Image (cartoon, rainbow, N blue to C red):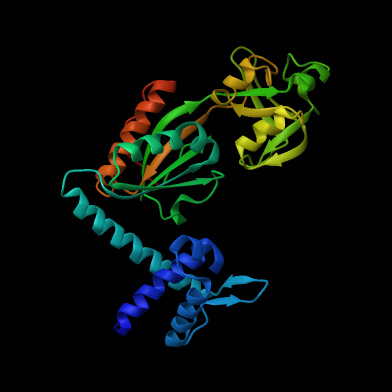
Amino acid sequence: MDEEGGVAEDLMLLVAVIEAGGFSAASQRVGIPVSRLSRRIAALEKRLNVRLIARSSRSFKVTDIGQRMYEHGASIRAATQRAVSAAHDSLGEPSGPLRISCPMALSAFLVGPLAIGFSARHPAVAITLDATDGRASVFSEPVDLWIRPSDQSLRDSSWVMRKLMDVPYMLAASPRVRDALPDAATAAGLRGCPAIGWTFKPRPAAWLLRHARDGELEIDVRVQFTSDSLMQIKEAAIAGLGVAQLPAMMCVADLEAHRLVAVAPGWAPPLMSLYALYPSRRDLTIAGRMFLDELCKAAAGIAGPPAPPQASHS
């Protein structure tokens, strides 16, 4: 093995270790024993005469130069994947890697089932689905297609953004919590009520609620449980920890089973819009374009036709 080839391979291992957050997790991902991984990174540090990872039995910390090397390595990997995808696309069939990132709730209810079905129909496509809390910066994630909810317009000149659908939210609680409220029929009656906070919101205890006839009202609630996961928030509501703001489509089965009931009917949090983001139409592979088309059709079946794709402008 020549020196340049060895450095390139070890750089990719460094990327894997940093993304996994440690040698043990990286070992499981890449199939290389921890001891060998550690030796390879140590050899890279010796060859470059720098410390890339400050590690001990209790800590794992990436140094500044290690972070810069990681960014270079991730960029090289992305360029290589694009080149491979371009070669696959020349065959006219979906193939190659496709990395998708979306919030955990969307992974469970929409994107995940679509990805499984897509993978079954197109075995030449290697799909990686990253479920997140929905708040990570899209511009730091090495993904081909990023699905993000937002309560405001998204703008960045380097990405194409496609609005998939508007997601209605509702106020829901367990029957026990609803029955214990002094006035569960109005938004004003929820002031100070036990509630479940969502860290996606800048102020989890300050709720803006809207009514088609009565306008807007902001109330303060008593948050006793907070999470970044809508799945956990729904489970906390079922467990009786308080009133929750949840996507209406997440609550259908639980409302029918009476595990959840509507609170303050007619009042609801503002709509949350769902977007698909990708670098540009030409950079999206055949597999990416096909998956996005299926995602748009699925979203249209839930909430009507999505908006056409458009490049954003700063």
Q: Position of residue 133 (x, y in %)?
A: 57, 44
Depth order, front residue of 265/100: 100
- Which quarter of the rendering shows the N terminus? bottom left
Location of residue 295 with respect to 209 vertically, above or below: below
Q: Is residue 108 visible?
A: yes
Residue at (40% x, 73% y) in the render: 11
Q: Determine whether, in the image, residue 293 is placed left or right of residue 195.
A: left
Q: Determine whether, in the image, residue 90 is placed left or right of residue 252.
A: left
State the image quarter where residue 3 is shown: bottom left
Q: Is residue 22 visible?
A: no
Q: Looking at this rendering, what residue extends furthest in the left direction?
A: 91
State the image quarter where residue 111 is shown: top left
Q: Position of residue 251 (x, y in %)?
A: 60, 23
Q: Position of residue 296 (x, y in %)?
A: 36, 30
Location of residue 273 with respect to 99 vertically, above or below: above
The number of numbered badges drawn on the structure is: 0
Q: Determine whether, in the image, residue 261 is placed left or right of residue 109.
A: right
Depth order, front residue of 176/242: 176
State the image quarter where residue 160 is shown: top left
Depth order, front residue of 185/101: 101
Q: Determine whether, in the image, residue 140 is placed left or right of residue 287.
A: right
Depth order, front residue of 22/233: 22
Residue at (66% x, 23% y) in the render: 171
Q: Position of residue 272 (x, y in %)?
A: 53, 31
Location of residue 210 with respect to 60 vertically, above or below: above
